Amino acid sequence: STPTVFHCYLYLEGDHTYSMSTNKILEQNITVPSKIKDEKGSDDSITVVKERGSDASITVEDSFHEATTSSYPPVSSEQAAATAANTIIIPSNTTVTSFSVWSKDFDDDDDSAILICDNASSLTPGSQQDQGQEDQSTISHRSIRKSTRLSVVKAVETRNSRAEKVLEELTINKLNIKSLGLVGREEEKSILNTCYERLCTASDESSSSSSGSNELVFIQGYSGIGKSVLARTMMQKQQQRGTVSSNNAVYVEGKYEFTSTDEPYSGISQAFGELCNKFQHCPDETRDKISSAIKENMKEEAYMLMSMIPEISVFLDLFADAHSTRSHGGSPGREHERWKYAFRTFTRILGSHFAPIIIMLDDIQWADVSSLDIMDYLISDVQNPHPLMIIGCYRSNEVDENSILYNRIQTLQGKHQKGSFQLTDIKLENCSIDAVNKIVMAMTGIDDESQTRDLAEICFKRTLGNPFFLIEFMRMLQTENLVEFNLIMMKWVWDVEKIENATMSAANVVDLLKGRMEKLRSDVQLLLQYAACLGSSFSIMILKYIWSEHACVKLVRATDDIDEMLEMIQEVKLVELCALDELRWVHDKVQEAALCLSDLVTPAFQCGLGMFLYQGLEEAQLEEKLFDVADLVNKGNPAGRLDVAVLNFRAAKKARKMAALSSVARYIDYGIKQLINDKWTLHRVLTLQLYSIGAEMAYALGNIPKAEEYIGIILDRDEFTPMETLPLKKMKAQILATAHLRWHEACDYGLVILKDLGYNFVWSGSLIPIQMLMAIKKIAKRVKNISIKDVENMQFMEDKNQLAVVDILKLMKHLTYSANTLPLCFLCVCKVIEMTLDHGISLCSADCCATFGGVIMFLFKDHAAASHICDLAFAFQKRSGRRHIADTMHGAWAFVLVQIKPLHEGLNLTMEGYSQGLRDGDPLDSTNCLINRFVLLPYMMGRPLETIMEEFPKIAPQLEESGIANNILTLKVWWQMMVNLQSPPMETAKRLEGDQFRQSEVTAESNMYVGNVNLAIGELLLFFGEHEERAKRLLGEEKGKTYSELVQGYPPHGIETFHRGITWYAMARKTGKRKYKTRASKVRKEIGKWVEKGNPNAKDYYMLLNAEQAVLDKKYGKANSLYKQAIVHAARIGHMSHAALYNERFAEYRLEVHGDGDDYEYHMGEAIRFYTEWGAMGKADQLRHELLKVHDA
């Protein structure tokens, strides 16, 4: 038969040199003319490979051209030898009329250069020409130096099977898809690169003091538009910047899938798993440091994270002792806060060893709410000194105003406007016809755009310029031989008319992919459908189990050669290996196409497959894939099946441990749907658990009607014990208070719950104050005799009923305080302490003990007893662990220690309370501590205003995240007050209207809010010298509503009381009226009691007020001495505002009473100096103006 004849070239493609026979790159970045054409039209492909370390040159001569010489980059001789070694000798008796000649060009002892020529006229194979021999019949229209010899001939195979094998190894006849890269996105790449450079600049500067250095980038567009490809350009940037081992940038990915929208944290966990794996090759010293940081800052939370991110064990296995991964058992909201804290802290720790971290989350339109919470929490972490970039890719056509992602993006845009982080939105459109043409040129290796224009136009028409669709379309054209590489002509050829007619039905990329798959064997198609049911990535082992035990048993099309089929679907680029036992789809559209291959994959089929896995997988495998299995089963929308109810209950419990509230709610709803009519008889416990968790999740998610519905279903039945219904009754009380604002009704219901538990402790409503006083005295007497050692030896409370009573009493403490029924509140606190002393320590003992210390301070001003009780509270806290630690610290400091310890000692204590509260998932008390640490205490200590306000942009996002309205408003009110204090004392500066806060726009009426507003206005009027207006407010709209009256015992009440006394004395000196003198004297005596009891922060208050009283009493010598003592004391402790205010009051007194202009000028100058140092520039300018007027007079 006629032998098959084909070419075999060493072919230069772009900037890479390929061997057709080995398909390996010989050398990168070689730039040589790929074609040299003589006048007769023959094409010569020439490439030189030269030994590394020296330049190579080659001379091409023929009868039509002068000699030309070119130089090329060096290549190692090992590469050349490797290429030459893979040869095929032409069989004897075969005539080759078109072939490639490989010859070596020798210059003296140099034998490393290779010259490739083609278009020889004839050659008899099996022979080898000697060195120096020149054969014109072999090399036509060309003369090569005589030193050339023919050394290797790779040529023709006479057998068709061998020819096909070699053809498969060619690269020249295949579309260049793998190295295609990103085409036509220069503007978008530039925007993303700008974000990256900004991120790296912030990282290099380690700008821990500046906020807003994190980068959030959203890339939106249709499926296949190139969102993830654009995002992965950051991976290339990271690789250029360095590796993990060199402490530089790192890029990781996570992906969400449309088949598992209920699975919590799936994309986040993938990304963090990859992040942990990056450390596998780090030095042991680095891993040891990270492990130590985890152990110190988040050990328990790290083990909690490991349930979701097993890869974190690379650090945790360094711990000598194991830790439980059990939930704290707190409320869903509290557990959710703990997970947020765990992710944020873990990110900070890893970021301290390499930065910046770049996290790409793909298809976030399918992300669960918990994942979006974590993304929000990480990117808005303004206290993270190591900048972070999160890139979120989503399909714009699947996100509308009703979607969760849309609302979250709106929230994030609001935070961005406040400077919390940088936000960039990149919208990708379909490629233009010119961009499509460039892509076609890149795939075919054609440099002339006019040659591919007609093909590009039909591609653009069929794909609308969608890059992924375009690639699949071109792949289909080659498969169908509508676009093919002609080896004789050495170029790509196509017929546009044929393509036009053959592709009329190519409606979308899914249909195109289906067409590709339908050309595969039927059993391979079946395997693809099974794999598609398992998600965007799937375990090879589980797929093999399904194939052998499900497909081969139930479907006759199944065969047992699964390994061969897995290799096949990888070869045709449908799936790719992503882990040792894990495959993933190359694109979610491929998975979608596999699901649509036939009518097999129906919801019922997926449900059945899910139940097959539920019943057949081993326990460890099932636990790992529990969400996937439950999601598969639920697709079938079954009803009335107990096994499905149990499965969903199990999935809900796992999701609850992760605090994925929305996922829990959906699994519970699926479970409840399975309950049958006689569920209360046959499945009583399961039914109760489903409705209880369902109510809990609905309440946590703000779905109050649904929560009340589930609560009513249970509480309307009589067969349950008080302990079984306790969580639901507790929730009902919380809903009455927080959702319906029926605080007193909630308190009454709390007493009903306690009565049901057998704890009926209230005599009657009218006798509660008397009962409270008796209980306080009784408990105070008992705790006075309790030592720290006694607490260390005390047992823990174990009786479930007693623990339940204590838990409800703690709830009652909060409800009654908010309802302003303080006698009942104090009584509940006493009962918790009493049960602690009688039955042992509970989780509520420490914080209630701290509150009891506040009660003793508030009612009896007994500093010694209150201090001792706080010491006991800290001892209880040490015994019971970290739970409620922020509550304990805040209660002890805010209501007791602030009146016993110097103010600066509260800075560390409140900071610890804040950090521990975050760790414990306690947003209320942690932000209470945060407000004290960064707002109240620094102001009460007279720190410079600018220094205080520098922290406000950092803590504002944290307060916003907490959602605690009172604390958010507190910061805004105090922030605006301090801004106004820096301004000139004009009329507008005396009102709380500005960029940070506008009183006219807020309608809140809580005691905390009203008290803060009145305090802030009072401070402005005091320091601006508007004593008359301040007194008018105190006697009018603020009567009975001062901060000290509305927020009793809270830290600023001391400074507010003192400043109120200054106003009364100023008005008494100015008017001589008795009403002002009486009020002034009352304040002075109250502060005197504080000092007498040992309050170290009120000494200068008392000195100043005594000086003011001495002036009224005309004891001027005493007044002079006391003023000076107060000034010296304030200056010595660094209280700038009081040092300024005291000097101002002394100067006015010296001028008004004694007419002493010199003293007035000196002390007014000192006041100006201290006001300037404090930051009240406007006030300082006002005093300079007044000083100048007095001096001129």
Image (spheres, rainbow, N blue to C red):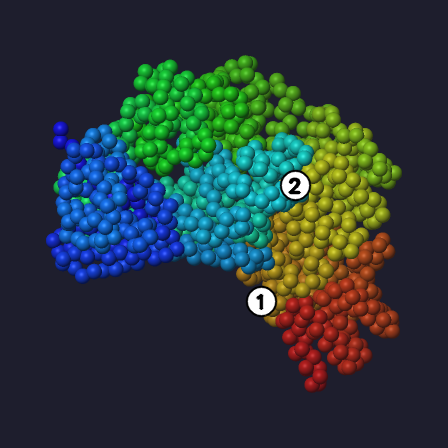
The answer to whether residue 653 is left or right of residue 810 is left
Which amino acid lies under the numbered mark 2 shown in the image of this protein? Lys
Q: Nearer the viewer, residue 604 or 697?
A: 604
Question: Where does the image place residue 691, in percent across and percent down from the top left?
Answer: 55, 25
- Identified at 15% across, 55% down, the residue is 38
| Secondary element at tag 1 | helix
- Identified at 57% across, 58% down, the residue is 207
Q: Residue furthest left?
A: 40
- Identified at 17% across, 36% down, the residue is 5
Can residue 186 be seen here? The reply is: no
Residue 295: which numbered mark, if any?
2
Question: Where does the image place residue 271, in percent across and percent down from the top left?
Answer: 49, 41
Question: Where does the image place residue 646, in percent across and percent down from the top left?
Answer: 52, 21
Tell me the quarter of the picture where residue 884 sits. Answer: top right
Mark 1 lies on residue: 988
Mark 2: few/some/many CA within 10 Å (<14, 14-19, 20+): some
- Mark 2 and mark 1 in contact (Cβ < 8 Å)? no
Q: Alpha-carbon distance for marks 1 and 2?
A: 52 Å
- Identified at 61% across, 65% down, the residue is 980
The answer to whether residue 246 is left or right of residue 508 is right
Residue 220: which numbered mark, if any?
none
Rendered-image quadrant of the N terminus: top left
Residue 761 higher or lower than 154, as above or below: above
Q: Which of 457 and 754 is in front in this view?
A: 457
Can residue 193 be seen here? The reply is: yes
The answer to whether residue 156 is left or right of residue 536 is left
